[in-house]
Amino acid sequence: MLTFTLRRISLFIFTMLVLTLLSFSLSFLFPGDTVINHSGQINATASELVQLNKAYQMDKSIVDQYGAYLTHILNGDFGQSMASQSPIRNEIIELLPATIELSLVALLIAMVVGIPLGFIAAINHNKASDNVILSLAMLGYSIPVFWLGLLAILVFSIGLGWLPSAGQISLLFEIKFVTGIQFIDILLSDSPYKWQAFSNASAHIILPACVIALAPATIFIRLSRAAMIEVLAASYIRAARAKGLSFQQIIFRHAIRNALIKIIRHVGLQFANLVTIAMVTEVIFSWPGIGRWLIESIYQRDYTAIQSGLLVLSCFIFIIHILTDFIYAALNPLARGNQHGS
Amino acid sequence: MAVSTMSFKPTLPLLISAFVSLLTGCNEANKLSLSERSIIYCSEGSPETFNPQLSTSGTTTDAIAKQLYNSLIVYKGQNNILGPSLAKDWHVTRDGKKITFYLRQDVRFHQTSYFTPTRLFNADDVLFSFNRILDKSHAFHQVSGGQYPFFQSNEFSELVEKVEKINDFTVRFILTRNDSSFLANLATDYASILSAEYGEKLFIENTPHKIDIQPIGTGPFKLKDYRVGSLIRFYRHDLYWQEKAKIEQLVFDISPSKTSRLTKLLAKECDVSSYPIAHEKIAERSDLLLESITSLNVGYFGFNTKKQPFDNKLVRKAISLAINKQAIIDTVYHSQAARAKSILPKTSWAYDSNTPELGYDPVRAKSLLEVAGYPQGFTMDLWAMPVQRAYNPNAVTMAKLIQADLKKIGVKVKIVSYEWSTFLRRLSLGEHQSFLLGWNADNPEPDNFFTPMLSCSASENGNNRTFWCNEEFDQLLQKALKTTNMSKRKSYYAQAMAIISEEMPLLPIAHSKRFQARGTDVEGDILSTFGGISFYHASKTKPTSEPQNLNEPNKSKKVSN
């Protein structure tokens, strides 16, 4: 387990170095002055510019410049947003939790819906229900998310009026920012409208989370179906059946556990996909997350924000990736011993 | 075998749906109390500042002016007669150079988490507010950039010699000359009164810039919370000097996208929406109300007269001749606007029906271009504003129409657009060649159209983004201000408009109505013919007692359809 951990950590560090190198080079590739792209201080006076050039060691070699940039990043100084002129770090701290919350809820929905459906399909392999589930999965996977999002708003918000279409919570509720994860903040707050706020926030998250969850859910259906079919064909299942165990015992004690391990490996991979979908969905549902912020920054040509946003998002996805790897390794001893990585 | 799995399959969705209906169900029932006492307004953009003295942007004025502040005097009633506000009465000497205001003695400033007033509003606050603008050595003059666009464009500091405190509740303005627009300018949203006590406190704490970010005023609402690009939350000012506002909480949901504003309106996530699209859709819903008001405004196509090729008036004229205004009015304004002959709308008393209008004549445009030395045409950029305003509900579409019109005379147009605050900033730097913008009047004074938009002083530090400066035009405006004789003033303004049509620094396109949509459960006037919107009279349910209309400010004329 130790070598596994060390290998993952070194992989993390090197990937992050490559990513910072990329975001560092973006400052040179974007139009405008490099040091202003780094710092985002578009209204800097001459003396401030001199200071900035010193801080980012612009007069020295490119390696020193990269070193200075890296020091800034490691100190949590991502510069200022060109559009709002407030520190990007603060903006990210405010917005990233909302994205994490939405993605995790969507992931949960995708798993809770997708995996059992996949199992059902596998158990009824080649029967009608299998075909129906597979066709639905194919259909769900093919629907573009922006279209689905708009359709969901049209039907559930405008047409039926069941669920709200925009934002994290009705603006009438004032929830103090503590962790940024809305549900936790609501529970921590001492507002007299706490439970109304909680139900309001739940109503707000349903539509966007379901829209995001659809595509990953269909992938989970196919993954879990394939895994289950494979497990059900394994000899230990045949042995269990020969021993006279009931169908339920076979599925719940043996098959599901072994199939789940195969699926968990893919959760990390799917998460990257899910965050990409979440970015588009955030725009559609006006979700105050980092994806929407990043897309707005692109529109406003806020180079500093684009750089740091990309860095933080990819870092976040990478951390989730590693975390699922750890969970997988913890659950499956076979993975830890694998000398040649995975 | 499959039975066992079948048994849990329906339970899960059932559980989820039960959970959801439980949540949404109790949500509807309990939220009523909170939402009844609050209004959510979907606004089109973020304010640039929380001090109306510092900006002439309509978005900013709408958001802050009438919510947070009061002026000394206001326009009242259908005929727009000046009436008392923070000043209960005023007196003008016969030569028009000394104006004395007698102030109310029962006005309290906002009490917020960041400031608690210890005294009532008095003459010091008036002096503080105006000296900040007038006196360049005032401790607060340079705070937030030292730009007071409205007052600088009409050269307020040259007009006002000084502001005197006679006693605690009497203030006298001494003017260098008689100016017929002085009182009208004091009645605008820009002449808001700030708290001198708050200023002193910030000065001692060495954080003077906070005065424009964390505002303290006398208005019917006080600021609770502001998140850039997201929301502004106001609470009611319970010690307001008039009857307090009917709603307790006012939230501005900042939604720059016009489709998201429509969605939120249809999904009941906002009670009132600014500049709605899809008028027919709103009109056919029984739970929504579309209202419009004939406001004093003009949407125009301006040229940067300091840049090639628009430094040549022949080019400006040629381009103007090539534009089919009627097509723009039919498409962009859905025929809900009057074609502009010049910058002054028909509803202004100074409007002259004989104003010449440059027609639509692409053939003449082409020949003018040849005379100007561009027989092959040229390539130009056109900056289209990214937000909707009453005077221009869709600048990008308008830009495309203009692009098509100009293509016919061989001029290629590149359309440029930025996020609103970036757009305004770059515009003020003069990076553009031509642009689409407009002007909303702040008072019924005709001068309000001329001086802030096209005077030389406005080209230096105001809203004149054409950077056009014409001595003769400026002198006419000065003459018109020096006299109170209406017919003389009218003729001066007619001459000024003739100069505009001759020089063409901009092409006036339309005077339009301003639209707003609201749920039928929201009552009370919000829009007004000029100046910012006000939620003071708005309420959610039917008021229990008859509202007292004795001393209401800024009651506006409204046309609903």
Image: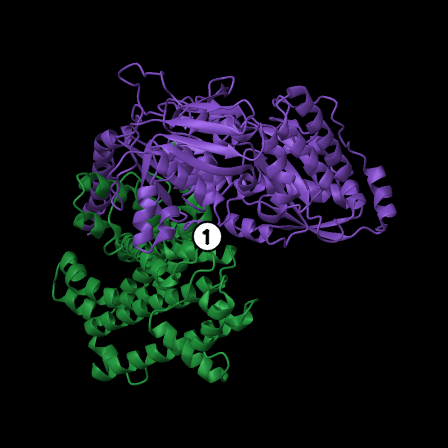
Position above or below: B255 against A333: above
Horizontal side, residue B180 vs residue A248: left or right = right
As drawn, the residue found furthest toward the top would be: B546
Across and down, in percent, residue B91 comes to: 46, 23
**Does residue A55 appear in this view?**
yes
Chain B representation colour: purple
Residue A212 or residue B154, whichever sits in front: B154
Q: Identify which amino acid the numbered label 1 is placed on.
A: Gln
Which quarter of the image is occupied by the C terminus of chain A? bottom left
* Residue at numbered disc 1: B142
> In the rendered image, which quarter contains the N terminus of chain A?
bottom left
Regarding residue A129, the answer to whether it shows in the image is: no
Q: Position of residue A51 (x, y in %)?
A: 45, 73
Q: Quadrant of residue A324?
A: bottom left
Task: Chain letter for green, please.
Answer: A
Q: Secondary structure at mark 1?
A: loop
Q: Percent from the top left, x then y, of residue A252?
A: 16, 59
Left or right, B511 with reference to A294: right
Q: Name the residue nearer the viewer: A134 or B271.
A: B271
Q: Chain of mark 1?
A: B
Q: Mark 1: few, some, or many residues within 10 Å (few <14, many ≥20)?
A: some
**Which is more toward the observer, A239 or B67?**
B67
Position in image of residue A15 (x %, y %): 38, 77
Colour treatment of the image: by chain
